[in-house]
Image: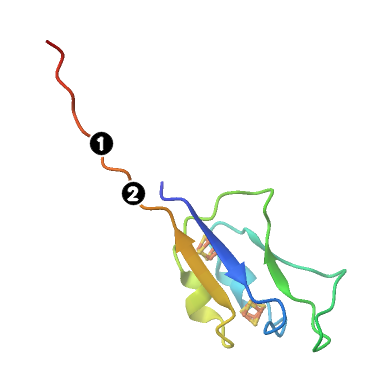
Amino acid sequence: MTKGTIFIDQEKCKGCSLCTAVCPQEVIVMQDDRLNLKGYHPASLNEANAHCTGCGVCAVICPDVCITVYREPQMKSHATTAC
Ligand code: SF4
Ligand code: SF4
């Protein structure tokens, strides 16, 4: 499975939680114990749950374009022959 990660701009986030609702891996959480400078509880990636696939759905749904997605390049496997 492809591995990915996201960066969420904490100060742009307006805490709408749309990204948490659409993430198929359920790895985005709202920070209920933290406020950004606008007074919203921002979203963040649950780092303890490293199952982000880099699918990009969260970035597409975010109305404020707060999310940048990074995806690990797929490694191609090469067959080797034994002599
Ligand atoms: S890129 Fe996909 S798996 Fe990763 S946090 Fe966003 S919606 Fe979830
Ligand atoms: S969809 Fe965007 S604005 Fe809404 S909580 Fe997620 S990162 Fe924040």
Q: Is the CB of mark 2 within 8 Å of ligand 1? A: no
For image coordinates 59% across by 68% down, the residue present is 7
Q: Quadrant of residue 13?
A: bottom right
What number is the disc on residue 18? none
Q: Secondary structure at mark 2?
A: loop
Q: Position of residue 22 (x, y in %)?
A: 55, 70
Q: Secondary structure at mark 1?
A: loop
The answer to which of 18 and 2 lies nearer the viewer is: 2
Q: Residue furthest right?
A: 33
Q: Label 1 amino acid?
A: Ser
The answer to which of 19 and 79 lies nearer the viewer is: 79
For image coordinates 18% across by 24% down, the residue present is 80
Q: Is residue 35 left or right of residue 10?
A: right
In the displayed structure, would residue 78 be above or below residue 39? above
Q: Position of residue 37 (x, y in %)?
A: 82, 85
Distance (Cα) linking label 2 and label 1? 9 Å
Q: Quadrant of the C terminus?
A: top left
Q: Circle 2 sits on which residue?
A: 74
Q: Position of residue 32 (x, y in %)?
A: 84, 70
In the displayed structure, would residue 24 be above or below residue 40? above
In the displayed structure, would residue 10 be above or below residue 50? below
Q: Circle 1 sits on which residue?
A: 77
